[in-house]
Structures are given as C-alpha cells and as structure tokens.
Amino acid sequence: MQTVQDAAGLRATIRGWRSQGQTVGFVPTMGNLHAGHHSLVKLARARADRVIASVFVNPTQFGPNEDFDRYPRTLAQDQAGLAEFGCDLLFAPDVATIYPFGAAGSVSLHVPEITDTLEGAHRPGHFDGVATVVCKLFNLVQPDIAIFGQKDFQQLKVIERMVRDLALPVKVMGAPTQRADDGLALSSRNQYLSSEERAESVQIYQTLQQMRDLIAKGHARKVVEQAAASKLERAGFVPDYVAIRRAEDLSEPADGEHDGLVALIAARLGATRLIDNLLFD
Ligand code: PAF
C-alpha cells in the first residue's frame, strides 16, 4: 500500500488507475482505526477496483471544548490495518493541504435543516466542518463510491444531502455499524471508558433495542423516548438526546407512524460521549 501526503502525488496515482478504466472506492477517516473502519475498507474493496482511505484529523469539525488535541494519532498502526484489509492507497494530508488558506480562511459549507437537530444542536458547527472536509476530499480523490459508517447516522444523512444538493458525481453508501460481542458500537472513543464504564456502556444498545420493541407494540413515541432517557440517567449516563426520528431525513414522525424509523442516542458516561442508533426495519 502506498501512502501519499500531497495532492499532486494522490492525483498522479489516481490518473494512472483511471487511464486503465479502473473505478475508485473511498473511505474517509480520522484515523485511530478499528474493526469498524476495516469493514468499510472491505466493502469498498468489493465495490471498486481500487481503494483509497484518508486519515485526516479535521480541525474544523471539533468544537472549542472538544478533543482535537487529544484525538489519537496512530498512523503506523492505521497503515498496517489498511494494508491488511486491501487498501491500495492511504492519503494522509497535513492541514495546509486541506486548508491552504488556514481553517479560519477556508470556504465553509453549511447543509441546512438536517443539521439543526440532534448532533447538530449539541455540537454547533460540527457538521459544517464535516461537510467542508468531505467535499474537499471528494474533490481531491474524485471517487466513484464513498463509504461511511451508519454509526454516525446523521453524518451519513448530511453527506448524502450535500452530495445530492451539489450534484457531486459520487455514490455515497452507508455501512452497518460494527459491534462488540455485547452490542457496544465500535468507536475510537471506547478506549477512554474505565472497565466499570465499559460494562455499563452496553446499556445504550440495549435501550435502543427496547425503544424499537416498545414502538412495535404501539407505545407513543414521546413516552418511549422519555422512559429510555430516564433509564439511562438512572444508570449514570447523562443523555444529550434520546430520540426516534424518520430515518430518511431525521424529521419527527407523527403519532402512530411505524415505518422507516431510527432511534438515536447520544449520552455521556463519565468523560466519554457515546453515540449509537438503531434502524427499526
Ligand atoms: O467520521 C469521520 O471519521 C469524520 O467525520 C470524517 C467523515 C472522516 C470527516 O472528517
């Protein structure tokens, strides 16, 4: 597997592949890769002739009190994992390659409406940073297909909407959340959990499953959301949101609506913020 840091090197390699009529699959990441990311690479491998992954800890998607400086940089380990799972090229740019005018001087994309809620409401500006960097990466890589984990469900929806709105020539695909044996969604943040917190953390997925089952039995959405939030609070979590939404656009479903729903939770356990979701179908 080749690793390139600059746009010219990236483009030269892709030009070579394109001249042979090969398709390109792309997996954007912020590094510190785990089995969840590797599953995205495997999916890209199955869908395209060539696979590119990027590792770039994007400063513009972190809020002032978030963990940008603390975010683990593990490039050598990431390279080994990507090579093992069939990635052809790792793009690991520095900040100046992605933000030639600095982060503050950059064009910034805002995807309206769908970013007003859930993560967007709790992390102001986060999705502007995500949309901006993903658009820049798409312009650099020009992939045929790009794969994103469904664990960051709202992020996937924001990117789908940006791609459609800007008519970007890339197919965006969501990949199923990878889970530990007890159900905890794999995340780089899980490593911050103490052993007691790790044992408690499984309650997020269990709560999502209970929410799905209660809605299927006909319970009212708001009652189910409130009961789930209270249960998590009693277990020591501090929930940011516990919500049932339409999976298509994250709007609020009407009473009695059952089809195409998703339950989403973001909650702090100690110093760690965990997010997860469950599609009801
Ligand atoms: O999901 C992530 O790792 C990041 O938000 C992404 C999509 C790579 C953009 O920085």
Image (spheres, rainbow, N blue to C red):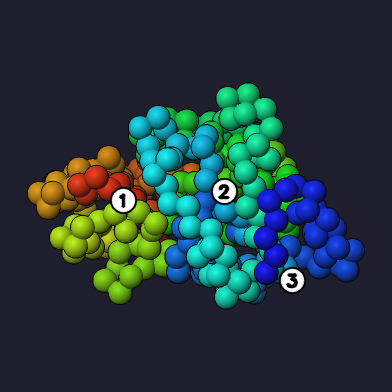
Q: Is residue 87 left or right of residue 9?
A: left
Q: CA distance from mark 2 to mark 3?
A: 23 Å
Kind of residue at disc 1: Leu
Report the mark closest to the observer, 2 or 3.
2
Mark 3 lies on a secondary structure that is loop
Q: Position of residue 16 (x, y in %)?
A: 86, 63
Instruction: Find residue 274 and name its label.
Output: 1
Q: Position of residue 56 (x, y in %)?
A: 57, 48
Q: Earlier in the sequence, mark 2 or mark 3?
A: 3
- Asked if the residue at tag 1 contacts the one at tag 3, i.e. Cβ–Cβ closer than 8 Å, the answer is no
Q: Residues within 10 Å of mark 2 (few under 14, many from 20)?
A: many
Kind of residue at disc 3: Asp
Instruction: Find residue 56 and name its label.
Output: 2
Q: Earlier in the sequence, mark 3 or mark 1?
A: 3
Of residues 221 and 15, the one drawn nearer to the viewer in this rendering? 15
Q: Earlier in the sequence, mark 1 or mark 2?
A: 2
Q: CA distance from mark 3 to mark 1?
A: 35 Å
Q: Position of residue 114 (x, y in %)?
A: 49, 37
Task: Reply above or below: 232 against 132.
Answer: below
Give the quarter of the image for residue 12. bottom right
Give the quarter of the image for residue 132. top right
Q: Identify the image quadrant of the N terminus.
A: bottom right
* Residue at 42 percent of width and 47 percent of height: 71
